[in-house]
Amino acid sequence: DYQTELLRTKLQIRVSSKLIPPPILSFSSCCLPQKLLQNIESTGYDMPTPIQMQAIPAALRGNSLLASADTGSGKTASFLVPIVSRCASYRLKHFHNNKNPLAIVLTPTRELCIQVEDQAKLLGKSLPFKTALVVGGDALAGQLHRIRQGVELIVGTPGRLIDLLRKHDINLDDIMMFVLDEVDCMLQRGFRDQVMQIFRALSQPQVLMYSATISIDIEKMAKSLVKDIIFVTIGQPNQ
Ligand code: ADP
Ligand code: MG
């Protein structure tokens, strides 16, 4: 409606579809678990940033997104908050089931993965939400063991995750959310085949893709990957 349009204009949020909920103005206005709200507060976040205002309610509703927002604008929490919320709720509801992983976040580097996992741990504190890091430099056995014990989220680099999947039986049937951080890099030659290989092993997860800049090529690839993908852009249109 008009109010939503006005709000988006003011926040410099552009969306490619009307089938996306309005931006939230506070973390407490979108039915997040109480413990998650407390964790967000302990992290020191008072107000959501514009990308968080728009991406969090959309991702909570199950929309697949291709989102672009400047470096340092809080993209990480904009996918981790919905991941923690959806995965912890799922686990509480299906506590008698197996403990297969529920979400995967892929990033191009070990360092980025470590940062993302650290933030995920903080946001998931005191909730049924555990994480596993799957990156080079540490023993594969330990990473496998951690997953086997039961985690909700795997954060990894594509090469290392493929290595793990090739050598060991990891059940990805319950993966409901798949995130590509730095997607401009992740869908470029070099990473693209590995990312596609992992994506094909999943059964139609919600897909969230993030980057500071997004080219027409990436938009095309995103559309061919997920047909009902919604584009979200924060700030001035880039080149
Ligand atoms: P991006 O991935 O968009 O480059 P990050 O997710 O790494 O950005 O966030 C950049 C910094 O902003 C981090 O230090 C993060 O903790 C902080 N941050 C994220 N969201 C908020 C918020 N709502 N309020 C205050 N600081 C935030
Ligand atoms: Mg980032």
Image: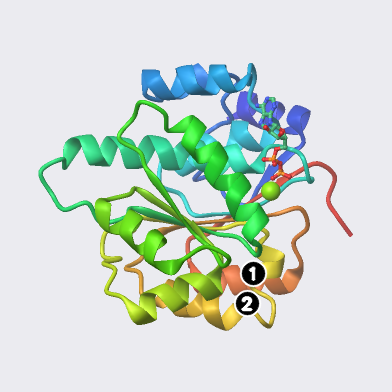
Residue type, numbered disc 2: Phe
Q: Earlier in the sequence, mark 2 or mark 1?
A: 1
Residue nearest the viewer, comparing 112 with 149: 149
For residue 186, which numbered disc appears in the image?
1
Tag 2 residue = 191
**Farthest residue in the left direction?**
96
Q: Give the percent coordinates (x, y) of residue 234.
A: 74, 42
Q: Are marks 2 and 1 in contact (CB under 8 Å)?
A: yes
Q: Looking at the image, which residue is at 53% across and 23% down? A: 40
Q: Quadrant of residue 128?
A: top left
Q: Secondary structure at mark 1?
A: helix
Q: Give the percent coordinates (x, y) of residue 192.
A: 60, 78
Residue nearest the viewer, comparing 91 with 64: 91
> Disc 2 beta carbon < 8 A from ligand 2?
no
- Can you tell me which quadrant of the image ligand 1 is in? top right
Residue type, numbered disc 1: Met
Q: Secondary structure at mark 2?
A: loop
